[in-house]
Image (cartoon, helix red, strand yellow):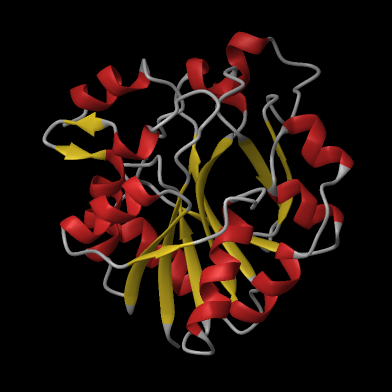
Amino acid sequence: MKILGVIPSRYASSRFPGKPLADIGNKTMVQMVYAQASKAKLLDAVYVATDHPLIEAHIKGFGGNVMMTSDNHRNGTERINELMNRLGDKYDAVVNIQGDEPFIKPEQIDLVCEAIAKSDVDIATLAKKISTEDELFNADTVKVVFNKKNRALYFSRQTIPFLRAVNQDEWLRTFDYFKHIGIYAYKTEILNKLADLTPSGLENAESLEQLRWLEAGYSIYVRETLMDSFGIDRFEDIEQALNKQ
């Protein structure tokens, strides 16, 4: 199976304009993500899909693969789908590597590649067991519950499940909670279908695109990872990111 890694990189973030080009140590954020993705053993190639000439020039400047895409896309899924369609039928699957996850591990990328290679998996993602109450009750930490076959039942910014008969300060010791690690892999033919879906009620309520797929009847395979990752949503997050180096 040939698998492409794509980093969607949009310049005009509402909370952090120019985020992909923000410096983290001695590299930009998008350069760090690209470097980590390039270390994955199961990716055949890595591309950045962007909507801005500054990002395009920056990627070319360090020798990376980049493609300019439309600035009308609503999300990274649509941006990646455009790139895949323009490349043609070269790849059987694609991994969506979030451009604001500079500490994504190559091993995590390989985990999701192994999952999407399964014949009965159309969409795959990762989850990690939650270890702190800060994560458990933080709305920026997306929680996921899945069934015994590792198929996602729901994603939420709320703490799920709610333990009715247990005090909240005992929840972590009573139940295994999982947070979503925002990396996805799709079979190429499924990506085309996902890109055509319209926003759904649950997606709009939680501001989580993957709920659109669940509402449309698609199955998401969840693989557990023991490794953490760290997304940068706001400028203030950079200081925490620097402390992780």
Regarding residue 18, the answer to whether it shows in the image is yes
Position above or below: 203 against 112: above
Apparent side of residue 75 relative to residue 52 in the rendered image (left or right):
right
| Residue depicted at 36% across the width and 66% down the height | 47
Quarter of the image containing the N terminus?
A: bottom left
| Residue depicted at 50% across the width and 35% down the height | 12
Q: Position of residue 215 (x, y in %)?
A: 85, 53
Quarter of the image containing the C terminus?
A: top left
Total numbered labels placed on residues in the image: 0
Indicate the quadrant where residue 145 lies: top right
| Residue depicted at 43% across the width and 48% down the height | 52
Q: Position of residue 73 (x, y in %)?
A: 64, 53
Regarding residue 230, the answer to whether it shows in the image is no
Q: Position of residue 134 (x, y in %)?
A: 49, 15
Apparent side of residue 175 relative to residue 195 in the rendered image (left or right):
left
**Who is closer to the viewer here, 63 or 152?**
63
Q: Position of residue 196 (x, y in %)?
A: 78, 65
| Residue depicted at 44% across the width and 73% down the height | 114
Position above or below: 84 against 50: below
Residue furthest to the front: 53
**Who is closer to the viewer here, 224 or 237?**
237
Indicate the quadrant where residue 229 lies: top left
Position above or below: 11 against 64: above
